[in-house]
Every structure is written in structure tokens, then in C-alpha cells.
Image (spheres, rainbow, N blue to C red):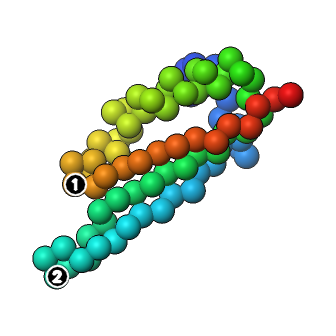
């Protein structure tokens, strides 16, 4: 989605930290929430706008998110490092 909008995802440019919550539900451990924080480096202000648009809709196109979102709350954010 990012490359289609002119935002490079070269090695080292895009990374993510992912964490989740496991809670006991009906005496069984269940993942109840996943938080994804993306880091996108060395982009222009224009690329940032394109990336923000892509990220605002990416969950509906992400196979993993579509698969689990019925039972797990997914939250995401992104930190941008702009080219100077």
C-alpha cells in the first residue's frame, strides 16, 4: 500500500514494534488486544501525507488484521522521521 503511493519501504526504512495482551477468558489464555507501532524513516512531508492515508485504511486490506479483528482489538500508530 505504501509503495503504491510512492513511499519507499526499503530495508531499514520501515519497522514495527508489536505488543499484545493475554488475558484469561473462561479459564483459558486468550489474546485480547494487539498494539502495532510503525516507524517510517527518511520520508518527505508529501510522502508522510500519503503514508497517513494508507495507514488510515490499511487494516481492511491486511490479511492478518482481517483474520483476527473479529475477536481481538487491534490498535496502531506510526512515528515518522522526515527527510530534512
In this view, which residue lies farthest toward the bottom? 27
The percent position of residue 59, horizontal first and vertical second, equals: 38, 37
Name the image quarter holding residue 41. top right
Judging by the rendered image, the residue that carries numbered circle 1 is 71
Judging by the rendered image, the residue that carries numbered circle 2 is 27
Label 2 secondary element:
loop
Mark 1 or mark 2, earlier in chain? 2
Label 1 secondary element:
loop
Name the image quarter holding residue 6. top right
In the rendered structure, the answer to whether residue 76 lies left or right of residue 61 reads: right
Assess disc 2: are there few (<14), some (14-19) or many (≥20) residues with their C-alpha within 10 Å of its C-alpha: few
Separation of marks 1 and 2 at Cα, in angstroms? 17 Å
Residue drawn at x 51%, y 58% is 18
Residue drawn at x 48%, y 62% is 19
Residue drawn at x 50%, y 23% is 53
In this view, which residue lies farthest toward the right? 84
The percent position of residue 74, horizontal first and vertical second, equals: 36, 49
Q: How many marks?
A: 2
In the rendered structure, the answer to whether residue 46 lies left or right of residue 83 reads: left
Q: Say whether residue 1 is visible.
A: no
The percent position of residue 76, horizontal first and vertical second, equals: 47, 45
Quadrant in which the C terminus appears: top right
Q: Is residue 20 above or below residue 80?
A: below
Q: Is residue 53 above or below residue 55?
A: above
Residue drawn at x 40%, y 57% is 34
Q: Is residue 77 above or below residue 72?
A: above
Amino acid at each position: 500500500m505504501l509503495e503504491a503511493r510512492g513511499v519507499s519501504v526499503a530495508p531499514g526504512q520501515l519497522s514495527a514494534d508489536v505488543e499484545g495482551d493475554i488475558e484469561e477468558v473462561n479459564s483459558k489464555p486468550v489474546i485480547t488486544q494487539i498494539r502495532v507501532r510503525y516507524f517510517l524513516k527518511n520520508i518527505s512531508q508529501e510522502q508522510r501525507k500519503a503514508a497517513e492515508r494508507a495507514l488510515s485504511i490499511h487494516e481492511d486490506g491486511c490479511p492478518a488484521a482481517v483474520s483476527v479483528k473479529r475477536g481481538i482489538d487491534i490498535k496502531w500508530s506510526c512515528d515518522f522521521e522526515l527527510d530534512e
